[in-house]
Image: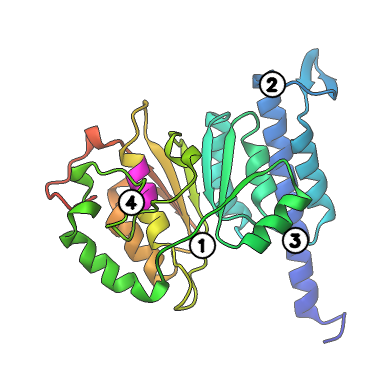
């Protein structure tokens, strides 16, 4: 294909605008968060008589997106759904399923908080962390395959170890296949304010699929002991499995807003649950 192909030029222009948009969001988040937080850093600027302290990793993120051809898979409108909440909640605890081109952005949005990335591909994990060693990424294994999605959605109702009413923790729950039972202790020992599900792979039969990530995010949110609910974001809801599992475990009544292929849920803790059946999440 020639370089002056109009379709190629349009794609290139769209990617450029998204890069600028992401960099702009990070810069905006930097401005707001640094007005609110006292972060130790050698770089200090003055603005209107206020001291604004720029975090090194935020500047790294701006530089990364300003000079890279790799852009986040989510659109600017999708990104803004979580950005708006992070702007209000940061610094907070932010759990992200997946490590990718958007990871530096999520980390920058939550400056001063805990942002943990869970990745299923060890080679990709190593590559990303070599480029951005300040990111907190952990390797995890899944016990499911996308080809099992329909059966798992039916069978969990007959497995008491999967029922939310039982209050069974995720850790070491080997009987419920949807439970992510071998995550790093950091995951189990933290109450997550936001959870982003944009992984694992879920577009071919042998892929892990996002069934366990969705189920486990719902369990974490329901088991929350602190005040308020848990914001859960699920990407690729245009796909059958993501949509069905979201409706089953994250619940339509908890849906705050949708944008493009992203759904935003606010899930209350179990004490506020109105489910009438032992296996029901909704």
> Toward the viewer: 225 or 272?
225
Q: Which residues are magenta?
A: 216-220
Mark in the foreground, 4 or 2: 4
Can the viewer see residue 152 in this picture?
Answer: yes
Circle count: 4
Identify the residue position indicated by label 2 in the image.
35
Q: Measured from the top left, where is residue 260 in percent x and y?
A: 51, 60
In contact (CB < 8 Å): disc 2 and disc 3: no
Cα separation between marks 2 and 3:
30 Å
Local SS, label 3: loop
* Vertical comparison of 133 with 261: above or below: above
Name which of mark 2 and mark 3 comes first in the sequence. 2
| Residue under label 3 | 70
State which mark lies toward you, 2 or 3. Answer: 3
- Circles 1 and 2, Cβ within 8 Å, touching? The answer is no
Q: Residues within 10 Å of mark 4 (few under 14, many from 20)?
A: many
Nearer mark to the viewer, of 1 and 2 = 1
Q: Which residue is mark 1?
A: 200
**According to the image, label 4 marks what residue?**
250
Q: Is residue 246 magenta?
A: no
In three-dimensional space, the C-alpha distance between marks 1 and 3, rounded to whole angstroms, equals 19 Å
Closer to the chain start, of discs 1 and 4, is 1
Q: Residue at x 39, y 48 (%)?
A: 217
- Residue 18 appears left or right of 206: right
Q: Are marks 3 and 4 in contact (CB under 8 Å)?
A: no
Distance of label 1 from label 2 (alpha carbons): 36 Å
Q: Is residue 260 left or right of residue 136?
A: left
Q: Residue 281's spot in the image, x, y percent?
A: 24, 50
- Mark 4 and mark 1 in contact (Cβ < 8 Å)? no
């Amino acid at each position: 294909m020639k370089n002056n192909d109009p379709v190629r030029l349009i794609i290139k222009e769209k990617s450029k605008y998204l890069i600028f948009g992401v960099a702009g969001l990070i810069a905006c988040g930097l401005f707001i968060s640094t007005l609110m937080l006292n972060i130790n850093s050698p770089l200090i600027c003055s603005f209107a008589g206020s001291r604004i302290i720029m975090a090194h990793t935020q500047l790294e993120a701006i530089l990364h997106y300003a000079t890279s051809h790799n852009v986040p898979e989510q659109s600017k409108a999708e990104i803004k759904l979580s950005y708006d909440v992070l702007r209000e909640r940061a610094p907070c605890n932010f759990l992200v399923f997946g490590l990718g081109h958007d990871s530096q952005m999520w980390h920058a949005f939550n400056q001063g908080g805990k942002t943990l990335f869970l990745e299923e591909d060890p080679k990709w994990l190593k590559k990303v962390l070599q480029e951005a060693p300040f990111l907190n990424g952990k390797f995890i294994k899944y016990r499911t395959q996308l080809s099992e999605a329909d059966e798992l959605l039916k069978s969990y109702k007959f497995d008491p170890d999967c029922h939310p009413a039982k209050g069974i923790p995720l850790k070491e729950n080997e009987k419920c296949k949807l439970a992510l039972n071998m995550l790093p202790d950091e995951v189990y020992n933290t109450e997550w304010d936001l959870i982003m599900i944009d992984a694992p792979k879920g577009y071919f039969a042998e892929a892990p699929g996002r069934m366990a990530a969705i189920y486990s995010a719902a369990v974490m949110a329901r088991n929350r002991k602190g005040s308020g609910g848990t914001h859960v974001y699920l990407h690729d809801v245009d796909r059958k499995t993501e949509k069905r599992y979201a409706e089953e475990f994250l619940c339509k009544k908890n849906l705050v807003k949708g944008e493009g292929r992203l759904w935003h849920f606010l899930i209350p803790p179990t004490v506020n649950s109105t489910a009438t059946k032992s296996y029901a999440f909704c």
